[in-house]
Amino acid sequence: MVNVGTSWVFHVDGGVALLDVVTFLGVLRHFHGPRALPEW
């Protein structure tokens, strides 16, 4: 069995958090247009 270290978990979690931000911005732009974020 592979021993997963704490730093590996933090790196994966950081990657998921960045992916969440990109997804949020993509959905916001898709449904509300490219000027949605400055107006928000």
Image (cartoon, rainbow, N blue to C red):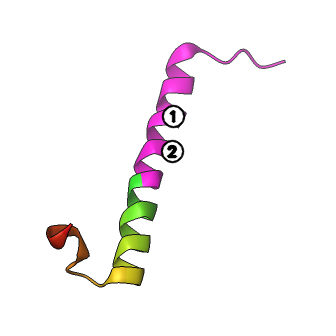
- The percent position of residue 31, horizontal first and vertical second, equals 41, 82
Image: 26 above or below 3: below
Circle 1 packing at 10 Å, graded few (<14), some (14-19), many (20+), is few
- The percent position of residue 34, horizontal first and vertical second, equals 25, 82
Q: Which residues are magenta?
A: 1-20
| Residue at image coords 40%, 48% | 18
Please tell me whether residue 19 belongs to the stretch shown in magenta: yes
Is residue 11 or residue 28 the one in the foreground? 28
Residue type, numbered disc 1? Asp
Residue type, numbered disc 2? Val
Q: Is the residue under label 2 in contact with that under label 1 (CB below 8 Å)?
A: yes
Q: Which residue is under mark 1?
A: 13
Q: Secondary structure at mark 2?
A: helix
Q: Which residue is under mark 2?
A: 16
Q: Quadrant of residue 8?
A: top right
- The percent position of residue 13, horizontal first and vertical second, equals 51, 34
| Residue at image coords 49%, 25% | 10
